[in-house]
Amino acid sequence: MRRTVFNEDHEAFRETIRAFIEAEVVPHYDEWFQQGIVPRELYTKLADLGLFGINVPEEFGGAGLETHKFEAIQYEETARAGVNFGGSGVHVLLALPYIKMLATDEQKKRYLPKFVSAEEMWALAMTEPGTGSDLAGMKTTAKLSDDGTHYVLNGSKTFITGGVHADRVIVCARTSAPTAEDRRFGISLFAVDTKSEGYSLGRKLDKLGLRTSDTAELAFSDVKVPVADLLGEENKGFYYLGQNLPSERWGIAYGAYAQARAAVRFAQQYVQERTVFGKTVASFQNTKFELAACQAEVDAAEAVADRALEALDTGELTAAEAASAKLFCTEVAHRVIDRCLQLHGGYGYMNEYPIARLYADNRVNRIYGGTNEVMKSIIAKSMGL
């Protein structure tokens, strides 16, 4: 079926990204995989391509566009090559919407030019040890100083994607106690400079997958955060977080679909080259049926992902629709990638093959951004159940 979501400009961008990946990423990716992190210089190169400024207003050095379609192409092209761009996705998909939505004009002048150039890489710190998806249960606090010039930040965060290379982190912290009527009240957002005294980077976490996307623990001990770095209003942080969850969940959905699509490509290439009992693996009926079934699932996931992309771009993607897209696409990717790995036989279990890395990378899609069990609850609630 013909796709209508992308135009000629998007396809020209795809060619640029594909060439960049082949020249600047693929030759070094095995080394980065072993190190468990991409080099900081990669972000500067991505910035030079203009990737960080697509959705940033022109007055701050960006292209001034309002679309996620270029991000969608990046998902497809990185998955196709079996690579990723480290924490850059968090920088653009997660952090930027908060800056655009909440930052004052003065803050935008300070933040956005450095954001576009990669002089400052951003991350988002919500999750804490022991709280998981229960953000209202966070313990990190930010107390306003007696003279009203700064907040004093104390606490810790975990599972922070892009945390190792981050120069600024949007930290969620309690500025007031929850009320009896609303335990979500009292959370605020701060753009914290990682060079601040008392800010410390903990372990770079050893993950099952997404090895080159650094994930870290953070700790704050009496960190002074200027009032000028409060994002939005005090105590409304939980509301702000809810505003941006649909775009985050769309990103997970689209990334999962792209991984499933790539898995079919990897498997098809492998079975056409691999011989068993004097015949290619592709010649067996079971192989044909398995890949045909996988392709049908990918076609369905593509339709869901594209529809969600169009809704997101027009501001019409609801929380329930984003949850539905995430649930469907991540479950499809789980099934498809597993079946494609099986077609590789023993080699599918070897990290030198992209299908093995893809299998590990994909598993977190059903966990982060809200577990798929949470997605089902959101969908059920929208159905009046």
Image (spheres, rainbow, N blue to C red):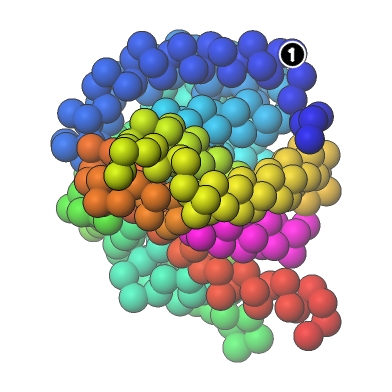
User: Which residue is farthest front?
Assistant: 278
Q: Would you say residue 370 sits in the magenta stretch?
A: no
Q: Nearer the viewer, residue 213 or 101?
A: 213
Residue 324, horizontal then vertical, whole percent: 69, 62
Q: Residue 245 at x, y = what percent?
A: 62, 55
Q: Residues within 10 Å of mark 1 (few under 14, many from 20)?
A: few
Left or right of 328? Residue 306 is right
Amino acid type at mark 1: Glu
Q: Write down the region rendered in magenta.
A: 318-335
> Could you tell whether 313 is left or right of 154 in the image?
right
Q: Judge left or right: residue 217 versus residue 133.
A: left
Main secondary structure along the magenta-highlighted residues: helix
What secondary structure is marked by label 1? helix
Q: Quadrant of residue 61?
A: top right
Q: Is residue 255 visible?
A: no
Residue at (24% x, 51% y) in the render = 346
Q: Quadrant of residue 266?
A: top left
Q: Residue at x 51, y 60 (%)?
A: 335
Using the image, determine if residue 371 lies above or below residue 322.
below
Rendered view: 269 above or below 285: above
| The magenta stretch spans residue 333 | yes
Q: Residue at x 83, y 48 (%)?
A: 316
Q: Quadrant of the C terminus?
A: bottom right
**Residue 172 place in picture, x, y as percent:** 46, 58
Check disc 1 and report the residue beneath it: 8
Q: Is residue 221 above or below residue 40?
A: below
Tell which of 57 and 324 is nearer to you: 324
Compare residues 12 and 275 and report the one nearer the observer.
275
Q: Is residue 184 visible?
A: yes
